[in-house]
Image (cartoon, rainbow, N blue to C red):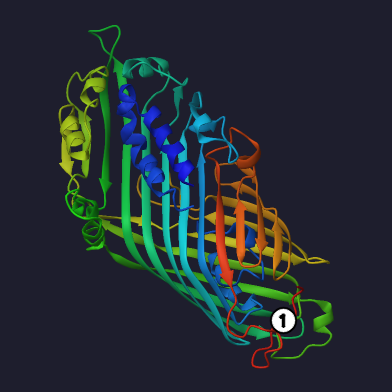
Amino acid sequence: MIQLRQIIVTTFTRICSRQQQWLLPFFCMALLTVSGSSKLAAQQLQALHGSPFAGSLSTDYNPATILDAPYRWDITLFGVQGKTITNGFRVTNYNLFSNIDSADTKAKPGYFRRYLHGSYSLNLLHAQYRIDHKQAVSFGVNLRNYVHGSSTPFYFNGYFKNSVDFVNQNSKTPYYGGNAQTSSWLEYNFGYARILHENEVGRWQAGVQLRIMNAVSGANSRVNNIVVTPDKNSANDYILSQGNGYYGYSANYDALDSNQSFRTNYRNFLRGTKWGAGIDLGVEYVRYADEYSSNYNPGKMPAEYDWKVAISLLDLGRNSYNYGKYSMGFSGFQDNVQVSRLDSTFSKYHNLRRLNDSLRTIVSGFDSLKGGFTINNPARLLVSIDKSLPNNFYFNAEVQLQFASTRSYSRINTRELTAIVLTPRWETKTWGVYLPVQYTTEGNTWIGMAVKAGPLIVGLHNLAWLFSKSALPNGGGYLALQIHPWGNHEDDNSYPCPRYPR
């Protein structure tokens, strides 16, 4: 993932070259966040969704499913995952088997809306414990980050000499606009699940998970309805006639000081961040296999299930931030501001203070943003159906319905990037092979793969990262280390475990 970060930084540098810096209000917050956060390689270990062996990681998609685990204890010592989607550029001459020195970046030419989305998280510790047959609890600590950027449609052929050249290429573009937002938070999760009803046919179970969140870092920007008109006094120039926008970031960045030690900056950065709460709700119905139903014994878990369906509401909540001192909003432009002036106005700034000074010279209204802002978590409805097949094979189908759009100008939202996933798998307690086919919210289709070998789980969302030299950065990967300590043997009389195949 370090290589991916280097690639994105290189791309950012090339796209936002000195002649193109006026594009920064559209994209800089999104790209800078990805380049800084992609070392966290996400919340979703997609291949494990529906698996009874997901254990403590199953709270990712439904808090009720911790009751499916065949272990009394299940602990995830470490997990990391990331996913990136963009149509604005691609990395060429490179895959995970290549030397990074051969990598190159190319912007996609054409007239269309451009976007960038990223979802990343670091699972610091997850644990699940079954109290008895009917109850289980879970605990987890995650560091999560979402980043989104989107523009209105415009034309780009891969290169332009200056701002006037860019506008010339976009003579039929009626207006320009874009938005970007990022939200990062540390969360402590506490889950509880219980069987509501059980008979010889199957069982209903429900779960709830409370998220206690510390809003670590946030930023957002909007650029609305930027219109340019031909300059009557110059045949080769244009006038900025209307538009408005703003950019803001969380105030804890103002506490950073290059003259202070890392420890001091770390302490100051986290001081004053806001706390909040979120919640996950889930219900699941498990249909028992016929051979178990004919020998039903209340108080025992089923030997194996035939099928199960899970429905959950996830990530209900939001994070709050205070605006930093250089967060600003603008409206309108001064009279006769030529587009050609943008190249010199924004060619030499190195920080937000200088950016503000530059903007003041061309806009008519300019004010500091006061108070705070909130960014909604990626709330969604998830429906999953899992079918058990002979010889340790299973099939899972999953649909995620996102509640909010990241393109909204009235609210600041984040969202997950998955829409539909079909996952055939072969797995036992120790081994597993998973082949998720994923359809994203932006219309990408990825064929992924994951393997489980004892405590280690590793996978890719998009196998093209291995076999194609033009797939990056679309895709991602995940890794987890999961153990089952403390008397998890099936012959432990204190806890009747199911007889899952080895």
Residue sitting at x 26%, y 46%: 248
Q: Left or right of 81: which side holds 295?
A: right
- The reply to whether residue 359 is visible in this rendering is yes
Q: Left or right of 231: which side holds 95?
A: right
In which quadrant of the rendered image does the C terminus lie?
A: bottom right
Q: Left or right of 497: which side holds 229?
A: left
Q: Is residue 470 above or below residue 272?
A: above
Relative to the observer, which residue lies in front, 397 or 389?
A: 389
Q: Is residue 302 above or below residue 276?
A: below
Residue 433: give x, y in percent of width and height: 71, 58
Relative to the observer, which residue lies in front, 175 or 445?
A: 445
Q: Is residue 202 above or below residue 469?
A: below
Relative to the observer, which residue lies in front, 3 or 82?
A: 3
Quadrant of the image occupied by residue 265: bottom left
Identify residue for label 1.
Answer: 498
Looking at the picture, which amino acid does disc 1 mark?
Pro
Quadrant of the image occupied by residue 352: top left
